[in-house]
Image (cartoon, helix red, strand yellow):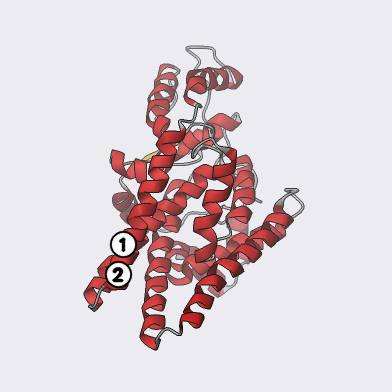
Amino acid sequence: MANIIASPTTGLDALAIGSALRAATEDLQQVNPAVGLLRFLGLGAATLAGFTFAWQSDSGWGLGVGCLVASLAYSFWIICAHDAAHGTLTGWRWFDAIAPRLISWPILVPYGTYSEIHKLHHAWNATDLRDPERVQWTAAEYESAGKLGRWNVRHQWVVNAVILGLLGLVYKSFSQGWRLRDSRPGLRRQMALDMTGMVLGQGSIVLIFVMAQVSLETWLHYAVMLLILERVMSLVIQGRDYLEHYGRWQQQENHVLTQLYGTSNIKTYGWVNWAMGGQPYHGIHHAFPGIPFNQLPLAQKRIEKILSDRQYPPLPTGQGYLGTSWKMLRQGYELIP
């Protein structure tokens, strides 16, 4: 995409357009604790209900359907951790610090590490190749990669989301955390805390099973539930991450415009935006991460009005997650020049 140039008809420069956008969204950065808490508790209840149904089912179909429903709900539930990382889930610092860890550690997701490197992602997206969540390779990286590496670049979405799955994402979080450990003062402590919490979280479940002397069938039951959860969660989390960032790497005149045009929004249903915590309005979120998910649709309308009045291009927007996924798969891979 060509660089964005300030409209000659308005005479506004990049600084002025940034100020106008910030002023238009300033009143939307107030968090209503009840809205975030209701979403967190609702998705948590759906997750627990699905797993309870699966656990008590006497048939393979019941186990599979229950786990699938629970895994989808859990995938959306874990996205609440993203809101918490920005302090926009409830706005209660203690809750937004504790709740995401309680739902992340038992499934071996390092929330604290993610929270720290995610802040670097927001600072470096489309501007600094050190971005720990960058999903697009550079042309130089592709040329220097071996045969297997180039194959991975051409198929990385499927490789990461389907083959490597959630475990690959967890490994990436820790490896990026270690690589950038000197870039954020709290990274080392968060990595140690995550390792301790993950061991205690999953270890407690295993210890309960051992002490209860559960049958081999129960162990297999549990293993199936974890497998389905890992597969579904990987597709949801990594799938949306690619759709919202891939092919958008290009710096604009200021940080706000870089984030608005350096990420993609996804046009979808209101309930999807609710479940995914505003992720479909990803460009708006990147430009103004302090806006809670329920205010992002209004923020987008105001931002698009200002951009249109100044003759800026429309924000990059995909038509639904499934449609955008199919389009991306057909287009093939892109490289950062």
Give the residue displayed 64% in from the left and 49% down from the top.
116
Give the residue displayed 71% in from the left and 59% down from the top.
179
Which x, y percent locates residue 34?
42, 35
Question: As shown in the figure, which amino acid type bears the numbered disc 1?
Answer: Gly
Task: Name the residue carrying label 1.
Answer: 50
Of 297 and 18, nearer the camera is: 297
Q: Is residue 296 above or below residue 123?
A: above
> Callout 2: helix, strand or loop?
helix
Q: Is residue 219 above or below residue 34?
A: below
* Residue 331 makes an appearance in the image: no
Give the residue displayed 45% in from the left and 40% down from the top.
282
- Circle 2 packing at 10 Å, graded few (<14), some (14-19), many (20+), is many
In the figure, residue 196 lies in which quadrant?
A: bottom right
Farthest residue, direction top: 10
Of 54 and 115, nearer the camera is: 54
Tag shown at residue 54: 2
* Residue 272 makes an appearance in the image: yes
Which x, y percent locates residue 144?
63, 65
Of 73 and 3, nearer the camera is: 73
> Callout 1: helix, strand or loop?
helix
Relative to 320, is 145 on the left or the right?
right
In the figure, residue 311 lies in which quadrant?
A: top left
